[in-house]
Amino acid sequence: MGFMLPESPLTTIESRLRYLLPAEMYVAMWGNPSVDIMIEVHKHLRTLQRILHDYTSRQIDVAKLRPGDVKTEWQYGTMMFTDLAGFTKLMEANASKGQEGAQNLTKQLTRYFSAMISTISKSGGELVEFTGDAMLVIFPKSERNDDALRAVRAGLRMQRAMKAFAEIETPSGIVNLKMRIGIHTGRFLTADIGTPRRMEHVLLGKDVQQAKLAESRGRNERVNLSEKAYERVKDLFRFEDGEPGYQLVVDDLTDDQLGAYEITPLRRRMASNVVIERDKNAVLQQIITMLDTIEPIASFIPDPILSLLVESAADRRIPADFPEPTIMFVNFIGLPESADRALPGEERKLALSFSRAFSLINAAVEARGGVLKKVTYHLSGSDIVIYFGVPNAHTNDEMRAASAAVAIREIIQNLKPPTIGNIQPEIYCQIGINAGPTFVSEIGEPRGRREYNVLGDTVNTTARLMNYAQKNQIVISERIKEAIESKYECVSLGDVSLKGKSKPMQLFELSHRKPKE
């Protein structure tokens, strides 16, 4: 006789609930749950719904979202990139204090991000994503055609707000935080890609790279404009020359001249009806309605991070920590740049190809216990950020990362890209792997836009290893080499000077897996 599931009003949706309930609640509701337990399930799902909305970009159209449905849309507006200087020192000053230091660092970051996100929102901007301590913000084009103006005003307000972070007291002395802001106006292709189990929202096109370039070519404590953004507001502010092709805004405005905030931000509306009836069937129907709204947005969260959010939903907070994970950056080059060449109607063909690549790479990472955190912007191509060791650690995370890197390189080499704009793009990757001390925490607003993130010099260094890599090359640090050399051929690249590093680093190429003896 086969195993029989218990008869329960929830039996029909058990497979949908098992990943969205904390373990104890899942057990409590199983069998023949009371109406009180079912109401608790509904309350938990309502809380989780709010958290997931806070964890995802407002650009994702929740009302029309169907997991697995690849969608594209050209959008126009002004993009802002920010980058924070001084965070590594702030992290190092708190790391020696353990949990007390983690709490203090979280407090300082929360104060910083809350101030910046509030200013962005009230200035009419949308925070699309966090990348470490950096932010990508979109000011959508409006009927008033004032997106560039709103972006510059927001940037000046944000730089003024940075005065509150000029001197932060730490256990190791005073740390100064400074910010660079870059602004560029243009168009970008948004695409929802992936499978029903794991979706990703990406921005494609050269204007995204131009906006990133405006930030990297800027200066701390200043707002730097590309030529296109400058042309839109050149008569509204005073400027001075920055690097060739860029203009720095001069903030000589009074508060009155800078003006009042543009808008009062509205939170994204959600179906969050409170259960009133105590009839099991009525409560079950409300649970099903809640699942229908949660599942699409949950598909944008990697499974291990979703599990963290589910288990910590009651506390509405994930504890911060100082782990030493293995970090991998993959620069996927060729396909993302094709967006600007796409002829009308070819955007979906491009997105479907990118979607397949993303899904295969994510499967390779998940199979080895890693987390594909996000696909983000880069000066060329798109960066894929991958973690091994957070939130779930293994004794051989370096080996798992090496195996995933070799698999990802093979996936990308075997892709057959579509012809876009009468050109078949050359597709390749650059991969960097590193391990070391990091800070892991929820960053952003405690009850607003936020994400689970891994920050620190180890992450920044990994990105630089990726940038140093040649076509289809995997560059690793000495620590990774020592952990994997028993099974992988590692070739010395010598001592290499990297941006931001006071002395050269010894780097290696992960060539291939050694034959089994």
Image (tube, grey):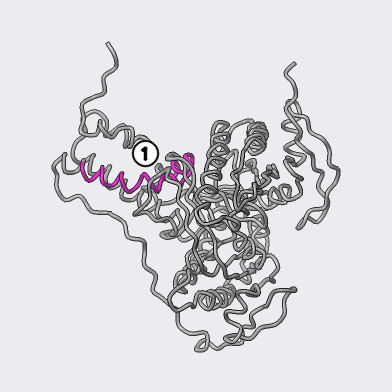
Foreground pick, 110 / 73 = 73
User: Range of the magenta residues?
Assistant: 285-308
Give the structural element (helix, strand or loop) at label 1.
loop
Q: Which residue is mark 1?
A: 22
6 in magenta? no
Q: Is residue 108 above or below residue 153?
A: above
What count of labels does the image hold?
1
Name the residue rendered at 57%, 34% in the picture: 364
Specify few, some or many for label 1: CA neighbours under 10 Å numbering under 14, 14-19, or 20 or more. Answer: many
- Residue placed furthest toward the top: 1
- Residue placed furthest toward the right: 494
Position of residue 171 measured from the top left corner of the image (x, y, whole percent):
64, 59
Name the residue rendered at 61%, 42% in the picture: 417
Q: Quadrant of residue 78?
A: bottom right
301 in magenta? yes
Q: Is residue 145 above or below residue 371?
A: below
Q: Is residue 183 above or below residue 195?
A: below
Viewport quadrant of the N terminus: top left
Position of residue 54 measured from the top left corner of the image (x, y, whole percent):
42, 56
Name the residue rendered at 59%, 50% in the picture: 420
Foreground pick, 405 / 451 = 405
Position of residue 126 measured from the top left corner of the image (x, y, whole percent):
47, 65
Say what amino acid the circle numbered 1 marks. Pro
Position of residue 428 measured from the top left corner of the image (x, y, whole percent):
68, 43
Left or right: 47 in relation to 89: left
